[in-house]
Image (spheres, helix red, strand yellow):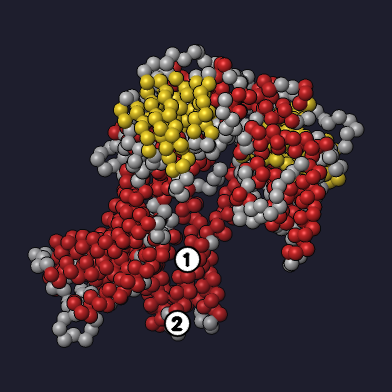
């Protein structure tokens, strides 16, 4: 018997957890001799106080939406894909290949092509661990972690020996053709008359990320494939009874997951850097796990959690810029957020639940 | 539903003068809006076997959990041997001399019997002393109560019946005077159940008090001295077992008259539906579980498979239902079925085979899914559930669920409720509705009434008979011999992966079937 209304479970509990995480973060800041209120102010104004700050926040959020969705889809199917980092960097390679070697007539076509290539490369990188899991039972957690390292080594090789322009000292590909530059968020919002700062990396990829959220929701809760993925994730044994092929479902889940991770690269590689850099993913693959955890593997939750983590990223950068608080502290805050919203969820849920029970009893 | 209906007799006190082992006074416990126990008072005489009977969800387990210190009662008092004894946790329960044997054993599978018995009562950092003294008291206990178990045997090598003995030994080793057993026979063969009852009788003769929680009327009649009936969180009656009868108890449990016997017309077998020849199945480690099974079922006929659990019945259902692979020949309506594909349930369903699996919680349902999602389970490709090539028509599934819930009497009739929130009987009704409603040519049913309350058993049996009368073939697997005998038109007995023989239920008895089940060929 669950007495808690759905909104309390989905909104109230995470909010309280978040509040606790921030209070403890404040205590940590106090402990190193800084002013937590001032620090919070810097974070909020830096990340959300201007459209410039919002731009950076949303740019980071776009990455986390893709990787968060990727982890969520696999998670719904009972698979823990920790390989977002590797899949996203391969996605970057896909974008680079599409942008460097195809003479696109227009950026929009290039975006579609690059997104497709990113998804393809990301999915391909997930396919091997998926196959090993489905056919050989090699645990996907282990293999995807190993594939992150292989991906990182592969990217070094590709960048140094193949994609690096002759004579360049930088481990990076050549710059993409300027005509392939994606419209910035400011440009797009300007079209509908909303003034938005243009000197930040937020770009049209954000809209694709939002479409991906809707797509994942549609997939998981409206299609047969999604139904089978979720059933498989809840009970493999029962799924076999229902005639759901475990090998096929494992492959589908990981391919979709890898594809979503890979698509992150259109934001970083095509939208921001305009060339493929070494370590273009910058940990977003791992943040995706936290985002999916906090977002309860639901697209709406993932979207909200991704914005929160975008805020933490941008706010943290501002904090490091304007105070003597070390940048590492932001990792502490992130860790506290993950700890309270993900791992110690029941600590808040149980009291809230009994509170609601008491309220109900009072009414009855 | 009123609390004081005229059906129940007033709770009667234990005979005057007999010392009481336990007295519960006015115990109440609510989980949120659900009143699991409501003002329950009960007196258990020392040296007696006291049965507590009631349907699933009647509050038996809650009451015992309160007695064992798992839950704290909202109100009420517990007296042990006449003394007010608060039991805030299970440690205090053990100290008060209460031992509990759970339905699902709490044993460390790769420990020996001895190690399991001293677990939590090691009495120091070093095991040596405790092991030696435990070994001695274990042999004493074994002699005293006929609880023979090899102290050095590893748990996972023991039969279920022996594992249960270890649980009882654990309690006795901790000096329990009051033993609570929660549905102890659910996992036992008839012979093992008889042995358990002998042990319980022995315990009573030695002055121990036994509380037996069950929903099986036969066990109550067979072994208890006194029986208390619970319904919807209340104690509806406490009576001497010798003064009552199964019909009366069933009525007290359910709150209305219940048909304990299945009524059915003679079968009129028609065309051959299922022909199985020389069916063989190996498990993952290569052990042959089905060793050449052959059987046939005609339309309008129920073939019952009797046997002790684990003799190949599950494998038979799984290979026919497309879950496991096998070799041999299986023909449905004269057409051969391929046995080589894994997870082939879809093609079986398409051919008109429906399957109510033995284990509804792990096979038949996804417990976290809502009822309507479970109604589509296995039939998620059905055309009437699709909106387009890609999208499922969730509204259509929900509408179908509402209709099925009404026709199959699923309570509460809420399609969006998660499967785990339904009682065992209603979960089973969801599975039965899903599988039977498509009018299959062949219905595979495993343990249709395991863990299902009496009211639902009656309903499910009626549905199976109705399907037979509609000219369908039914393969029924059950470890409940009563169920097999009352439902089947023919009975095949399985032992060690083979069919030992076929009998006409009208011309056989439990003794003969029991011999076949034990592998004694006649």
Give the residue number, with chain letter if any, for mark 1: A338
Viewer-side residue, B315 vs B435: B315
| Closer to viewer: mark 2 or mark 1 | 1
- Marks 2/1: CA–CA distance: 20 Å
**The residue positioned farthest toward the front in the image shown:** B522
Q: Nearer the viewer, residue B512 or A358?
A: B512
* Residue located 48% across and 67% down the image: A337
Front-lying residue, A67 or A79: A79
The image position of residue A239, as x and y in percent, is 40, 44
Tally of marks: 2
Q: Are marks 2 and 1 on the same chain?
A: yes
Q: Which residue is mark 2?
A: A326
**Residue B228 marker:** none
The quarter in which the C terminus of chain B is drawn is top right
- B313 vs B142, left or right, is left
For label 2, count other residues whose C-alpha is less than 10 Å away and answer few (under 14), some (14-19) or many (20+).
few
| Secondary element at tag 2 | loop
Pinpoint residue B190: horizontal percent, then vertical percent: 64, 32
Does residue A222 sit above or below B50 in this rendering?
A: below
- Residue B30 position within the rendered picture, expressed as x and y whole percent measured from the top left: 65, 42
Q: Position of residue A119 (x, y in %)?
A: 25, 61
Q: Residue at x 32, y 71 (%)?
A: A150
Residue shown at 55% from the left, 25% from the top: B484
The mark that comes first in sequence, 2 or 1, is 2
Please tell me in which quadrant of the rendered image residue B41 appears. top right
Query: Given the image, what chain letter belongs to the residue carrying mark 1?
Result: A
Residue drawn at (74%, 30%), measured in percent from left and top? B223
The kind of secondary structure element at disc 1 is helix
Left or right, A217 with respect to B20, comes to: left
Q: Is residue A215 visible?
A: yes
Q: Chain of mark 2?
A: A
Visible residue check, residue A184 = no
């Amino acid at each position: 018997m669950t007495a808690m209304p759905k909104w309390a479970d989905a909104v109230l509990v995470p909010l309280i957890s978040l509040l606790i995480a921030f209070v403890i973060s404040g205590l940590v800041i106090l402990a190193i001799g800084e002013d937590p209120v001032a620090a919070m102010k810097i974070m909020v104004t830096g990340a959300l106080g201007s459209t410039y700050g919002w731009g950076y926040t949303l740019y980071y959020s776009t990455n986390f939406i893709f990787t968060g969705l990727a982890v969520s889809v696999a998670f719904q199917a009972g698979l823990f894909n920790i390989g977002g980092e590797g899949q996203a960097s391969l996605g970057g390679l896909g974008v680079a290949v599409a942008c460097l070697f195809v003479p696109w007539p227009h950026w929009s076509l290039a975006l579609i092509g690059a997104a497709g290539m990113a998804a393809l490369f990301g999915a391909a990188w997930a396919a091997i661990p998926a196959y090993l899991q489905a056919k050989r039972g090699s645990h996907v957690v282990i293999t995807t972690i190993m594939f992150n390292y292989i991906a990182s080594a592969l990217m070094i090789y590709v960048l140094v020996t193949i994609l690096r322009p002759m004579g360049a000292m930088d481990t990076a590909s050549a710059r993409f053709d300027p005509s392939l530059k994606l419209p910035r968020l400011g440009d797009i919002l300007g079209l509908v008359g909303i003034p938005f700062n243009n000197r930040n990396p937020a770009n049209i990829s954000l809209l694709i990320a939002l479409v991906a959220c809707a797509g994942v929701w549609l997939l998981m809760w409206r299609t047969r494939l999604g139904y089978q993925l979720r059933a498989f994730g809840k009970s493999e044994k029962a799924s076999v009874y229902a005639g759901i092929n475990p090998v096929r479902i494992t492959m589908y889940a990981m391919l979709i997951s890898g594809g979503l991770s890979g698509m992150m690269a259109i934001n970083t590689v095509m939208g921001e850097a305009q060339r493929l850099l070494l370590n273009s993913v910058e940990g977003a693959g791992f943040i995706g796990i936290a985002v999916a955890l906090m977002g309860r593997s639901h697209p709406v939750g993932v979207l909200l959690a991704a914005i929160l983590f975008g805020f933490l990223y941008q706010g943290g950068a501002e904090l490091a810029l304007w105070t003597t608080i070390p940048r590492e502290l932001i990792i502490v805050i992130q860790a506290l957020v993950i700890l309270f919203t993900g791992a110690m969820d029941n600590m808040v849920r149980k009291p809230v639940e009994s509170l609601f029970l008491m309220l109900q009893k009072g009414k009855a | 539903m009123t609390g004081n209906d005229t059906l129940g007799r007033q709770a009667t006190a234990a005979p005057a003068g007999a010392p009481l082992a336990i007295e519960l006074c006015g115990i109440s416990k609510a989980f949120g809006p659900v009143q699991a126990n409501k003002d329950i008072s009960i007196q258990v005489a020392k040296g007696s076997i006291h049965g507590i009977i009631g349907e699933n969800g009647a509050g038996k387990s809650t009451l015992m959990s309160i007695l064992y210190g798992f839950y704290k009662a909202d109100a009420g008092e517990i007296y042990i041997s006449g003394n007010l004894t608060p039991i805030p946790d299970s440690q205090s329960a053990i100290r008060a001399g209460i031992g509990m044997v759970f339905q699902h054993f709490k044993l460390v599978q790769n420990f020996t019997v001895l190690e399991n018995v001293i677990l939590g009562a090691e009495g120091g950092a070093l095991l040596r002393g405790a092991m030696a003294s435990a070994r001695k008291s274990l042999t004493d206990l074994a002699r005293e109560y006929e609880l023979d178990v090899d102290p050095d045997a590893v748990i996972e090598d023991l039969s279920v019946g022996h594992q249960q003995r270890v649980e009882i030994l654990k309690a006795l080793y901790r000096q329990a005077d009051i033993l609570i057993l929660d549905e102890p026979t659910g996992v036992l063969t008839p012979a093992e159940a008889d042995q358990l009852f002998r042990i319980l009788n022995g315990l009573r003769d030695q002055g121990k008090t036994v509380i037996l929680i069950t929903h099986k009327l036969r066990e109550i009649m067979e072994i208890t001295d006194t029986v208390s009936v619970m319904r919807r969180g209340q104690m509806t009656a406490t009576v001497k077992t010798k003064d009552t009868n199964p019909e009366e108890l069933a009525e007290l449990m359910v709150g209305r008259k219940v048909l304990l016997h299945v009524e059915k017309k003679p079968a009129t077998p028609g065309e051959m539906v299922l022909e199985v020849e020389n069916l063989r199945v190996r498990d993952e480690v290569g052990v042959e579980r089905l060793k050449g099974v052959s059987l046939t079922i005609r339309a309008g006929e129920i073939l019952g498979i009797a046997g002790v659990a684990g003799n190949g019945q599950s494998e038979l259902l799984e290979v026919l239902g497309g879950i496991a692979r096998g070799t041999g020949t299986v023909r449905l309506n004269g057409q051969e079925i391929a046995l080589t594909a894994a997870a082939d349930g879809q093609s079986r369903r398409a051919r008109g085979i429906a399957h109510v699996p033995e284990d509804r919680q792990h096979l038949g349902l996804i417990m976290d899914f809502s009822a309507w999602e479970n109604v589509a389970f296995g039939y998620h490709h059905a055309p009437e559930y699709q909106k387009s090539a890609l999208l499922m028509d969730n509204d259509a599934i929900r509408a179908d669920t509402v209709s099925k819930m009404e026709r199959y009497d699923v309570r509460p009739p809420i399609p969006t409720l998660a499967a785990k929130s339904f009682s065992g009987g209603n979960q089973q009704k969801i599975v039965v509705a899903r599988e039977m409603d498509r009018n299959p040519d062949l219905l595979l049913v495993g343990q249709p009434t395991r863990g299902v309350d009496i009211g639902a058993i009656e309903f499910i049996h009626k549905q199976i008979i109705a399907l037979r009368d509609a000219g369908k073939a039914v393969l029924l697997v059950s470890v409940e011999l009563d169920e097999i005998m009352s439902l089947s038109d023919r009975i095949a007995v399985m032992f060690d992966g083979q069919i030992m023989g076929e009998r006409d239920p009208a011309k056989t008895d439990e003794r003969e079937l029991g011999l076949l089940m034990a592998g004694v060929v006649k």
